[in-house]
Image: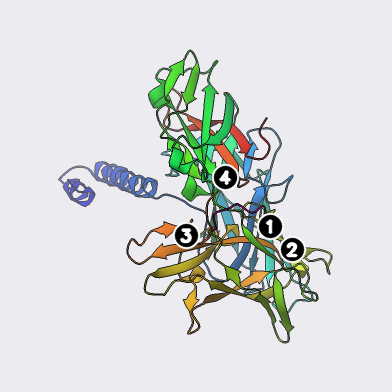
Amino acid sequence: MKWFEKLKDCFVPRNDVGNIKAVLSLLFLFLSTTASAQTYNNTVYRPEIKSVEFYKSDKEGSFPIITLDAGETVTLGFDDLKGGSRTLNYTLEHCDADWNLSRLSPAEYLQSFTDDRIFDYTYSTATFQKYSHYEIKLPNNNIAPKLPGNYVLKVYEDNDPTKLLITRRLYVVRKRVSIAANVLPSNNVALRRSNQKVNFTIDYAGLNVQNPHQNMRALVMQNARPETGRMNNTPTYIRGTQLVFNDVNINDFAGGNEFRHFDTRSLRLNSDRVARIYRDTANTVMLLGDPVRNSPNYLLVYDNDGKFFVLNQNGNDPRVDADYAHVYFTLAANKPDNEGTPYIVGQFNDYKIDENSRLQYDTQGRYYTNLFLKQGVYDYQYVWVSSATNKPDYITLEGSYFETENDYQLLVYYRPPGARWEELVGYAMLNTAKQQ
């Protein structure tokens, strides 16, 4: 029976208090079910919100994970191109391993208050583009997690949670398991030169695990990209208190290629990827054309694994004195537009494949776009979406090689007996170039 039909049935002759309790109970059930069905991603909901950075505070660009009650913090920073000041609030909400809201009340997973206002903001100085820079650090005296696990950080306007500006994924770990992992060539002979396979073992000694197949699971991500995540629900085999994940068919990732990059730390001098810079009433940066890189052999290029860093070598504080520029990209894809469309992605746009990242086709057979970006160093890559399949293809334009340097994040989740939530009990970061 639908929820509103149940609601209608509540209004049978009875005392008013009974009616009110029944209605409120069903409304709470409906709202909880609706909320928990939403999966939260890293998303910017307003076009005027730019340059969103979210990282562990001790290292810019790092993976946003902190240890519970260890004094560690994460930093969120972003710009509002409308300038001035707004009434902005933020909160944390606990999620399961699939990023659906846990069915918990805020009192169960948060200390102190359930939300707080952002008071730390600064106006830009000496820039063509005026903006306000906002920043918060978590945990703080007003907002702090009580349980380990996944949390979605929400920033919204006018004390109204429906007026979302930003959502960001935060990981809070209480380490209770040990992880051993390595990266090998694919077991599939045809993919040995292009793929990287992650094998790992989890030792849960000390945890109360009644059924490892139901109480524990592990997520593997490449370069902290949610779309690459592989959830491991069942181990290949169990050896005592060790869960071994090394089946030939699991955690086999395309190695991809090193990211392309450009450098706009200075708008006075051209970097190695900048063709021209124009400065008038706005900044315009023309980048050199990009070729297709799907060649037979791997070429070593140093990158930042898709990250971006806001920097201004001609200023004092890039958070407020770095300017914005219209950055023009061109791609010689050697493919007609009726076969598909290329998109440009990176951490700077949360790897979103949408109209904002879509390239246009010109009469000379090239694809082009321009993005309004803050000064700094940016990694990016192109994704081909075929008209026939309508699925993203990360290899056609970039290639894939086993030698590519990548980070892999391993996260272990545990559901305590009788609990209504999942805890994050283990984390390991594995780099293909720094294996022991």
Can residue 268 be seen at all in this image of the molecule?
Answer: yes
Q: How many C-alpha atoms fall within 10 Å of the one at disc 2: few (<14), some, or many (≥20)?
A: many
Tell me the magenta residue range: 295-300
Q: Most extreme residue toward the bottom, as rendered?
A: 280
Tell me the mark number nearer the camera, choosing from 3 and 1: 3
Looking at the picture, tell me which residue is in the foreground, 241 or 300.
300
Under circle 1, the secondary element is strand
Q: Which residue is under mark 3? A: 396
Q: Which residue is under mark 1? A: 135
Disc 1 vs disc 2: Cβ atoms closer than 8 Å? Answer: yes
Tell which circle, 3 or 1, labels the residue nearer the N-terminal end. Answer: 1
Looking at the picture, tell me which residue is in the foreground, 20 or 103.
103
Residue 319: which numbered mark, if any?
Answer: 2
- Write the residue at 23% across / 48% down: 3
Picture layout, residue 300 above or below residue 352: above
Q: Which residue is under mark 4? A: 170
